[in-house]
Image (tube, coloured by chain):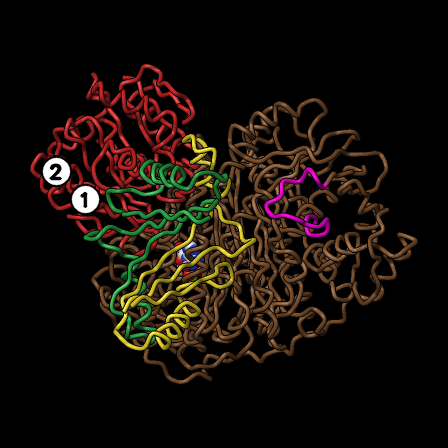
Chain colours: A red, B green, C brown, D yellow
């Protein structure tokens, strides 16, 4: 298993993601600059959290038009795994690799806290290790995590098991309490909570560990 | 040449910022405000050129970047 | 020299210079300065840049110690944390700008303090903020809280540095002048620390970061002047922050610092290009020549004085080794940052500025520093307050008093604030706000060590007795670090006071510094950096004197961090330190009796050390389940905080020797509440006594209520009241 | 009755959002964009009434809430 972590100007969870991947998924992690036009040969592309381009205009909007994105689209097209966390989720919706959009939190404030999640679908390469523990706790930290999609899109997503994580208590006004989704092919996932911040008992909860273990398992 | 792009939340899309404006205005004693929607306005300074062509180009900019048509509508105006 | 109009005394006075300062300039130049030169003198000699009222008193602070690598005088203080690593930190105020434009004022305050830290080669790893607002009922308070908090979060969150702690007070004394003090802590390799001396001539001077606009012109002089009715009209000088550019600057500068190209580097903070270039040249003993036409500009027709005084944010000035320009340019261009060569160091000892083919400034650099005003302003002592005897206070309804205190603005939970701050980015935060520890704990990345960080000041004590209050602020900060299991190393400070030209205000400043000095010396807790913010007054009414202290400690085993959330049923509560029932200047007196009176509790520094050492040893030995220092609201509130954090009720016994109010809410200093296994209680008390530390068994954990003596409050009810004050207040727009 | 409020960064005030738009558009091959400024547009639905009076009230709303006059300019239009 090899992974690439994409770095945009303004990414700020890239180091956290690399550490979590190295410790719990694979030792082979590359850092890839947004201006690159090709990816190293990897199984997983990880788009980390942060404020790419300052979240100016719309969060994720400018990053989604970066040169590296067409390589990521090709990778996804070929069935490669793509995970976008927080700002990475925003980038993936802006790039139309995932449906919907992430709007300003309903409370209009940045919200940083631990949230309880229900793992709705453990049949994905990102969530298989949650099998048997359908509830977990992972922190969120975002200003624009309010997931929106038209009702028929939401219905379809729910019907196809594309909702992977749901909030027990909605922190941001997200439609149908959605915290994380996967595309219809099942290889591109976006979520607002930060599993990479929840892998070490010293720094808080460990609800993100199964996320990284799932990815390690997906290729073993 | 200048272009102005208006970007507004699409009908049917919840607009938390607009809602916050309504309730804040109510508190400030402006009960006459029944509803509000908040959008963006982007003013572009363009190289001088043909207005029709410019409108086309700015429309492309909107489609490619300035608006997210999943949640937003846009409108382009070219000013001399 | 250009034919520019020369200036006169009247002009100088408009810029805040005094007649004697003007005369020194004339003597040094042998002529009248032109407008650019005068502007440069005025900002360099403003209170903000020259510390002219405080300098001689700041010298009283101890600034050396075993751990100190670099004390005050550089952008930030540097201390040794072992393994070839250094911790670099500083606190700074952004009071005036935050009052005028709370979001941008607070945001740019955070940006500025981060630049001071990464300028020296450190990666910022933690932010704290010490906030003082006016009375909750004052109409400006709510929007100020909302804007300041959003601004601090907006900037720090975007840059991706966790905001891990802080303090928030409300008092009518801040109605017209809020305080926004931001602290940044960074970590660097000791072999890669950067200082501001631009040694060597002929070296290129590189400008990098945001373009220069007319932002904040005379910001430094504004920070050195009282507010008046015209302040609203001064609004346009407020700067707008761009955290996205800051983030790129951090990454690009840290990358360039690895290449060995840099001789000196400075952020453009107060007084922008002027102070950064003069400081580098002055410290390096060289001259500097700049071509202002090369300065990246955001606006057209900027004049030389505007460029030199602009306080546009997110800009850095770097002196490079000759021939290394291309390396630097490549890095900055990759990060999409504006970069320009704007001059070089010279052997003239002068600052020479060229603009549109003319020399617009040619002044010797040394006098700007050497002749900088250094005033011995007259001062007088604050009137001494009488001590209040425990028997003087009204009989107390203990349950009601506890509730009143726990939901009072100063004590109530600040969750509404810190949930807007990203506290976990960088994935090294062990304890942050709300983490039920007396200090924030941040792991040193890639090691087993951690830093403990706390910011403290009790302005009501300082107001009642500046000397004792200054001492207390330092001691409380030290105590907070001790209580987490850390070894306190050093402090930074931010001294917020009123108009120093008034002897009673100057007296507060002088005596607070002396109190701090005594405590820092006794506790071996040197001051390595700091900031002074004066003229915090409106229409002649000064803020309560507020010397905020930011302390840093080191923990060798990050896993051993102690908090106060792990108390269990049946554990014993042991109180360390003497209790006399000191209610003077207490929160109790203010919130329950509505009186701000009485001498504040004195700090016995020798006992402080002894007690602290005992707590440290007990933590190291693994004898304690939880520790919490006693501060605002005394034993009763400390106990309630332990109960709330642990989710377990408790019973704190009454003390027949003292009235309830004095026993439960007195604020005697140097005390800690320990939670220990019941079996261990008597042994620990024995050990304490052997160590010369007073210890007594004052209660036990258990149940689902906080019981003080024979009254109690259900834990859930107390929690709800404690948690809801701030959100209710903020919602109630 | 409807009112539209345009809020723009005041001249001379740094507009990081506008700058980000310019550079993103450059990267997307719209070199003709020389400058951009980003502002807000707030559309209010008001109780019907006198237009002059409404304009006055909306101006008050701008001063008190909708615009931050320290760094923004605003403009009010009343539509029938
Ligand atoms: N402005 C703020 N920003 C971040 N955290 C804050 C702020 N104000 C208070 N806190 C947090 O709230 C908690 C209680 O604060 P305080 O009562 O001042 O602590 P202490 O008395 O132990 O010094 C601490 O965790 C502190 O870090
Ligand atoms: Mg406290």
Q: Secondary structure at mark 1?
A: loop
User: Visible in this render: residue C672?
Assistant: no
| Residue at (13% x, 42% y) in the render | A154
- Between circles 1 and 2, the one closer to the viewer is 1
Determine whether, in the image, residue A183 is placed left or right of residue B64: left
**Residue C597 drawn at (x, y percent):** 52, 79
The question of residue C304 being in magenta is answered with yes
* Residue sitting farthest toward the top: A41
Q: Which of A104 and A172 lies nearest the eye of the viewer?
A: A104
C160 in magenta: no
Does label 2 lie on the same chain as label 1? yes
- Front-most of C431 and A24? A24
Residue A95 in view: yes
Q: Quadrant of ligand 1?
A: bottom left
Q: Vertical placement of C633 versus C367: above or below?
A: below
Chain name for mark 2: A
Q: Which residue reaches farthest left?
A: A159
How far across and how far down the image is residue C711, in percent?
26, 74
Q: Tell me where residue C414 sits by quadrant.
A: bottom left
Label placed on residue A157: 2
Identify the magenta region.
C292-308
Residue C543 location, quadrant? bottom right
Contact, mark 1 vs mark 2 (Cβ under 8 Å): yes
- A93 above or below C173? above
Q: Residue at x 87, y 58 (%)?
A: C24
Classify 10 Å Cα crowding around label 2: few (below 14), some (14-19), many (20 and above). Answer: some
Q: What residue appears at the point 29 percent right and 37 percent down from the top-left corner? A: A94
**Residue identifier under label 1:** A149
């Amino acid at each position: 298993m090899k992974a690439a972590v994409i770095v945009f100007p303004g990414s700020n969870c890239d180091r956290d993601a690399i550490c979590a991947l190295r410790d719990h998924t694979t030792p082979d992690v590359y850092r890839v600059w947004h201006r690159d036009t090709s990816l190293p040969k990897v199984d997983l592309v990880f788009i980390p959290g942060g404020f790419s381009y300052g979240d100016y205009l719309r969060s994720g909007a400018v990053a989604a038009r970066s040169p590296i994105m067409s390589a990521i689209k090709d990778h996804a097209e070929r069935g490669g795994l793509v995970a976008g966390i927080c700002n990475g989720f925003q980038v993936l919706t802006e790039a139309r690799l995932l449906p919907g959009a992430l709007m300003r939190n309903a409370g209009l404030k940045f919200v940083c806290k631990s949230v309880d999640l229900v793992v709705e679908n453990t049949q994905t390469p990102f969530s298989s290790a949650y099998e048997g523990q359908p509830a977990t706790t992972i922190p969120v930290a975002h200003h624009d995590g309010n997931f929106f999609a038209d009702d028929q899109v939401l219905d379809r997503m729910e019907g196809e098991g594309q909702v992977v994580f749901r909030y027990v208590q909605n922190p941001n006004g997200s439609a149908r309490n959605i915290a994380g989704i996967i595309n219809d092919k099942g290889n591109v996932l976006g979520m607002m909570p930060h599993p990479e911040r929840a892998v070490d008992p010293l720094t808080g909860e460990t609800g993100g560990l199964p996320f990284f273990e799932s990815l390690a398992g997906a290729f073993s | 040449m200048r272009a102005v792009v208006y970007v507004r939340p699409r009908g049917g899309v919840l607009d938390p910022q607009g809602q916050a404006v309504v309730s804040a205005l109510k508190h400030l004693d402006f009960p006459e405000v029944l509803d509000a929607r908040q959008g963006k306005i982007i003013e572009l300074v363009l190289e001088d050129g043909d207005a029709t062509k410019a409108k086309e180009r700015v429309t492309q900019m909107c489609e490619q970047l300035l608006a997210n048509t999943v949640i937003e509508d846009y409108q382009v105006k070219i000013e001399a | 020299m250009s034919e520019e109009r020369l200036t006169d005394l009247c002009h100088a006075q408009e810029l805040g210079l005094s007649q004697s300062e003007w005369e020194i300039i004339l003597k040094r130049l042998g002529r009248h300065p032109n407008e650019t030169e005068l502007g440069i003198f005025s900002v360099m000699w403003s209170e903000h840049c020259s510390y002219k009222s405080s300098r001689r008193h700041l010298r009283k602070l101890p600034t050396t110690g075993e751990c100190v690598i670099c004390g005050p005088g550089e952008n930030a203080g540097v201390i040794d944390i072992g393994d070839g690593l250094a911790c670099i930190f500083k606190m700074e105020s952004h009071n005036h700008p935050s009052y005028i434009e709370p979001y941008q004022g607070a945001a740019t305050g955070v940006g500025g303090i981060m630049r001071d830290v990464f300028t020296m080669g450190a990666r910022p790893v933690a932010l704290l903020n010490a906030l003082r607002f006016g009375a909750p009922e004052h109409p400006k308070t709510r929007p100020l809280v909302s804007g300041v908090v959003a601004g601090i979060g907006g900037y720090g969150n975007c840059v991706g540095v966790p905001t891990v702690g802080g303090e928030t007070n409300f008092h009518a004394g801040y109605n017209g002048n809020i305080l926004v003090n931001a602290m940044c802590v960074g970590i660097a390799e000791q072999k890669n620390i950067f200082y501001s001396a631009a040694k060597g001539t002929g070296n290129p001077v590189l400008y990098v970061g945001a373009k220069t606009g007319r932002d904040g012109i005379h910001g430094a002089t504004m920070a050195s002047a009282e507010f008046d009715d015209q302040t609203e009209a001064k609004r346009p000088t407020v700067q707008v922050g761009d955290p996205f550019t800051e983030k790129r600057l951090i990454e690009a500068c840290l990358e360039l610092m690895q290449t060995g190209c840099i001789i000196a580097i400075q952020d453009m903070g107060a007084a922008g290009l002027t102070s950064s270039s003069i400081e580098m040249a002055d410290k390096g003993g060289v001259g500097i020549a700049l071509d202002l036409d090369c300065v990246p500009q955001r606006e057209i027709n900027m004049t030389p004085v505007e460029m030199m005084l602009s306080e546009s944010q997110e800009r850095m000035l770097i002196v490079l080794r000759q021939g290394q320009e291309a390396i630097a340019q490549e890095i900055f261009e990759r990060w999409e940052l504006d970069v320009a060569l704007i001059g070089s160091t010279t052997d003239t000892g002068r600052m020479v500025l060229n603009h549109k083919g003319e020399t617009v400034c040619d002044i010797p650099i040394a006098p700007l520093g050497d002749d900088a005003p250094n005033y011995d302003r007259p001062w007088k002592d604050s009137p001494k307050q009488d001590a209040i005897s425990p028997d003087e206070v009204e009989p107390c309804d203990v349950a009601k008093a506890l509730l009143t205190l726990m939901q009072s603005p100063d004590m109530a939970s600040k969750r509404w604030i810190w949930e807007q701050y990203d506290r976990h980015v960088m994935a090294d935060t062990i304890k942050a706000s709300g983490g039920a520890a007396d200090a924030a704990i941040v792991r040193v990345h890639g090691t087993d060590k951690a830093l403990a960080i706390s910011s403290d000041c009790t302005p009501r004590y300082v107001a009642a007795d500046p000397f004792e209050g200054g001492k207390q602020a330092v001691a409380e900060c030290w105590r907070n670090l001790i209580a987490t299991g850390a070894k306190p190393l050093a402090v930074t400070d931010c001294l917020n006071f009123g108009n120093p030209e008034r002897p009673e205000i100057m007296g507060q400043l002088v005596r607070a510094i002396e109190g701090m000095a005594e405590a820092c010396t006794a506790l071996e807790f040197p001051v390595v950096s700091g900031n002074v913010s004066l003229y915090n007054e409106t229409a002649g009414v000064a803020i309560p004197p507020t010397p905020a202290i930011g302390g840093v400690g080191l923990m060798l085993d990050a896993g051993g961090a102690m908090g106060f959330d792990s108390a269990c049923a049946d554990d014993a509560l042991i109180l360390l330190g003497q209790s006399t029932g000191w209610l003077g200047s207490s929160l109790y007196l203010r919130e329950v009796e509505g009186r701000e009176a009485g001498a504040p509790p004195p700090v016995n520094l020798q006992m402080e050390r002894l007690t602290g050492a005992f707590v440290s040893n007990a933590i190291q030995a693994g004898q304690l389940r939880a520790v919490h220092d006693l501060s605002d609201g005394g034993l009763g509130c400390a106990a309630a905080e332990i109960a709330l954090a642990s989710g377990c009720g408790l019973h704190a016994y009454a003390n027949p020797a003292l009235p309830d109010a004095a026993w439960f809410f007195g604020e005697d200093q140097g005390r800690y509440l320990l939670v220990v296994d019941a079996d261990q209680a008597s042994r620990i008390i024995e050990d304490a006594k052997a160590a010369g530390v007073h210890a007594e068994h004052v209660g036990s954990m258990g149940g689902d209520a906080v019981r003080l003596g024979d009254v109690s409050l259900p834990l859930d009810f107390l929690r709800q009241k404690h948690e809801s004050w701030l959100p209710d207040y903020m919602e109630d727009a």
